[in-house]
Amino acid sequence: MNTPIVLACITLVSGGIIRFFSKVAGANEGYGPTYMLAQSIAFGSVAIVIHLVQRHPLDLSLKMTGVAILGGVIGALGIFALLLAFKMGGEGSVLFPISGLSVVVAVILSFIVYREPVTATKLLGLGLALGSIVVLSR
């Protein structure tokens, strides 16, 4: 198996665990912003450790810093909305599939922004993904 696929699989598992922990926080009446702050501190700490281990300087262009900040704001709003949905009694078996549609958004943006090829197989995959999410969320 090639390295990008292995890394994507790690992302799949860790992303699923992070989302499940959002359910745990919501079900246990965790206050969303405080939960997000604690999670952000952990993310930042891991980033610092990686920088130290790799001995890589902190460098990011102004444009990419803006993209990172915008992504952080959008991500924070999404996580807060998910935490609030769980706190209001939302079921993981319904909310996780709906929020999982974020993959479809990312694929469509990749098609548009990076002009990645749109094939019948990829369209079928997107259709099946949408279909499975509709079935799972009922």
Image: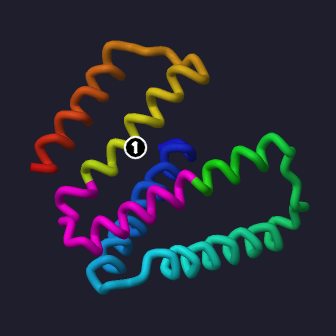
Q: Is residue 133 magenta?
A: no
Q: Say if 9 sits above or below 2 in the image.
A: below
Compared with residue 133, is residue 25 higher up or lower down, i.e. above or below?
below
**Tell me, what colour scheme is on the image?**
rainbow
- The three-letter code of the residue at mark 1 reads Ser
Residue 74 location, x and y as percent? 55, 51
Q: In x, y percent, where is residue 98?
A: 27, 48
Seen in the image, is 55 located left or right of residue 65?
Answer: right
Residue 51, image quadrant: bottom right
Find residue 38 and report its image quarter: bottom right
User: Please, what is the dominant secondary structure of the magenta stretch?
Assistant: helix
Query: Left or right: where does residue 34 sit relative to residue 42?
Result: left
Of 7 and 47, the residue lying toward us:
47
Foreground of the two, 29 or 55: 29
Which residue lies at the image location 43% right of the left edge and 15% below the top edge? 118
Q: Determine the residue positioned at 53% across, 61% down.
A: 76
Let me know if residue 87 is in the magenta part. yes
- The residues colored magenta run 74-96
x 36%, y 22%: residue: 122
Q: Is residue 120 left or right of residue 4?
A: left
Disc tally is 1
User: Which SS class for mark 1?
Assistant: helix
Q: Position of residue 23 (x, y in %)?
A: 30, 72
Please provide percent x and percent y for residue 48: 76, 73
Residue behind mark 1: 102
How many residues crowd mark 1 within 10 Å: few (<14), some (14–19), many (20+)? few
